[in-house]
Amino acid sequence: MVKKSFRNDALQKVCGTARFADDYSFPRMAHSVPVYSQYVHARVSAILVEEAERMPGVLSVLTWKDVPGSLTAGQIDQDYPILVKDRIRFTGDVVAIITAETRAQALAAVEKVKVDAKELPILRDTEEAIKSGAVVIPEGRAGNIVNHHKVRKGDPDKKMSESDIIIEEFFTTPLVEHAYIEPECGICIPRDDGVLEIYGSIQHPFSTRRFVCAYLGRPLASVIVRAHAVGGSFGGKDDTASIVCARAALAAVKLKRPVKMLYDRAWSMKESYKRNPYKMWYKAGFSSKGKLMSVISRTLADSGAYTSTTPWSTWRSAAQNIGPYVLSDIHADVYGVATNNIFTGAFRGFGSPQTNFAFEQIMDMAAEKLDLDPLEIRKINAVRQNSETITGQVLDDHTVSLIEVMEKTASSINFKEKRKLCSQGKGDKLYGIGMAASYRGCSLGAEGMDFCCASVNVQFDGSILIDVSVFENGQGAPSAMIILASQMLGVPLENIHYQGSTTATIPDGGTTVASRGTMMGGGALKDAMDTLKAILRKTLLPDLAEKEEEIEFRDNRIFGTKGRSLSWNEAGKKMYLARVYPVAFGTFQAPKVSWNEENGQGDAYFSYVYSSQAVEVEVDPEKGSCRILNIVASHDIGRAVNPPMVKGQIHGGIVQGAGMALTENFMTDDEGRALSLNFSKYKIPRMTDIPDIEAHIVENNDPLSPTGTKGIGEPALEIIAPAIANAVAAATGRRFTSLPLDLSSLKRETPQKEPLKK
């Protein structure tokens, strides 16, 4: 384990020499911009481009007629159009691409494109969308329900009738913007050999390649997507960022020259997918002693105009419907519903922040009714070793540490004593403390195929080159891989060189999502290293030992018996003189999982991350404001490879979750047109809004992960919002069930002062 923070890209980022997508430029590069319409939902009769084509510097104006491949593509449903043909479905649909010699010339031509269309009824509410007779948004479907996930276990109606108290509540969460610092950018360079090279502000090169090849009608091998520095993603640079690259490629192929398409912030916020807004109805029964007896829940997730990853994120909402608690009787339904709103997709947390916001408040509401401490009611119901989850999975193959992380958080913040100080609505400045807990299924689970790959290549001089099919979005994935490689081979960090991956240098190892990078990439890297060591031992045996198992890799050398050893430089030369390649390829397939779609039963994930967070707040009822005073977080992530970066992930996730709790709400007008088109209209937390965060790393090596690691990116975010909501309730004596928490209703009228007498 490294004790000091390590980032292989730290110097470049601090000095400003790291190259992001817009930093790349190529000879004869033209510039493309998108053209939107004024419509939200409309039937298109004509897209008129002739006037735009005559504008100075304009090289082409492309519409759907110029697309050589499929007009639509997608992660699950192939429904997302590169350019609209006959129906506009949301405010961010693009009708044309203008390419010119300069960006300014392309922008000047935008207003010259005219769209003739007939407006159609606009559907914005998920409850309205599922009614019989509602206008149908998706093509080829009978209705607007794009998916339905269930959990069926026991007899919740019977157990509800036997419960001593029942909590019934409705919760909502809004559209949330990813707010990455770098907007979308895509560059395509047509090569002389017919290959298209893509640079872009993208999350996963292989996903981008799939989109590009689908739209352009090309084989996968004919497109190379390069990885480079990315200015944040948080799940948000897949569909939209990929389609930006595809549009640049479409123009580049048409013009036979490099093309860049750079989005400004307004385009990015208008078009890019958001976190799914949820409507959640929960009914939960408890015994007089605090035991959870029954849950009946129904959730509507707004998919917006296109499906994207809604079926996957809502699956997690079903599998983790009540958080980390034991329950034998549950009936849960989670629906993805199409509307004319901005479409929604992957976002850090992926379906669990919404359900955690609801059920972690229900736990506190039950505790209050039963006069129990919030920590105590969670301990009563917490999953433990060998517990069975709501999906029927027995937690018997890893350390179940929920009690450990909750107690760590509670003791660190002095939770029980500070609960006695909560204002409950009394006073001028109201104090409250709240907590929340979660378990998060590791990696993709039963929602996808989960495997990864890596390669290692020892050079002639003994330096070591690695490549892992895990991609950097700013989180430090290459740094973690370098640390693991260094430890596996016993060499200094500086001896390991991480290759800038492309879709042509390493096979597809799955998207960098679901907090899976270190665990899956590390597993593949270990497999590659084990193979490499076997090759080295066999070839170097005559120089070092009598038996292969006697050869060790440590202290920057390869050791044998009787004092014999080789430097890596010497070993590299001997391998090549022996005509044996010191090269290995490794893979890791996630352990088997299972799922029955009919009843929501099965081993949903092969392991879990256990988390707990607590927060202290001060609410000013006169201003209707909330100030965060203190935050403590504890997360069992298996094994911490790069502890300072783990804490950085915890801090970053908490900041994002605090924004979701208190300030972030992507605004649209009554017809669904985006209003939050810059950060002046979309409030993310400032540095002054967040206090120092006390982060505790709990380590219980996971036996199902080859390196003992799990993940932290999403667990860090998914429970701070309910912790804040619980703290606000303890401060004000009122419960807030919608995000962001609207405290304006607390504002007290300021007494009118009598006018001064003359």
Image (cartoon, helix red, strand yellow):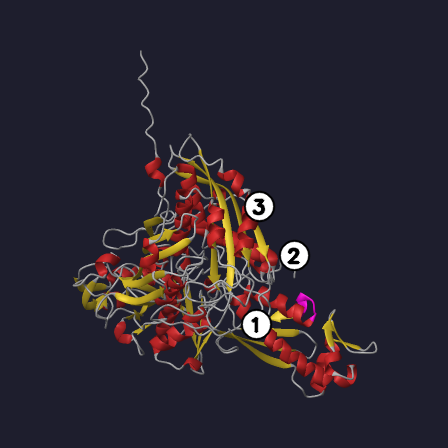
- Residue shown at 65%/60% (left/top)? 2
Tell me if residue 492 is in the magenta stretch: yes
Residue beneath disc 3: 412
Mark 2 Cα shell of 10 Å, populated few (<14), some (14-19), many (≥20) = few
- Find the magenta span and give its range: 490-495
Helix, strand or loop status at disc 3: helix
Task: Please provide percent x and percent y for residue 620.
Answer: 41, 34
Vertical placement of residue 367 versus 391, above or below: above
Residue 540, given in percent of the width and then of the height, sits at 74, 83
Q: Mark 1 — residue? A: 523
Find residue 4 and name its label. Answer: 2
x%, y% of residue 212? 38, 74
- The residue at the far right in this view is 562
Position of 108 relative to 423 (above/below): below
What secondary structure is found at the residue carrying circle 1?
helix
The residues bearing labels 2 and 1 have C-alpha atoms spaced at a distance of 23 Å
Left or right: residue 568 compared with residue 649: right
**In which quadrant will I find the C terminus?**
top left
Q: CA distance from mark 1 to mark 3?
A: 33 Å
* Whether residue 257 can be seen here: yes
Q: Which one is closest to the eye, mark 2 or mark 3?
A: 3
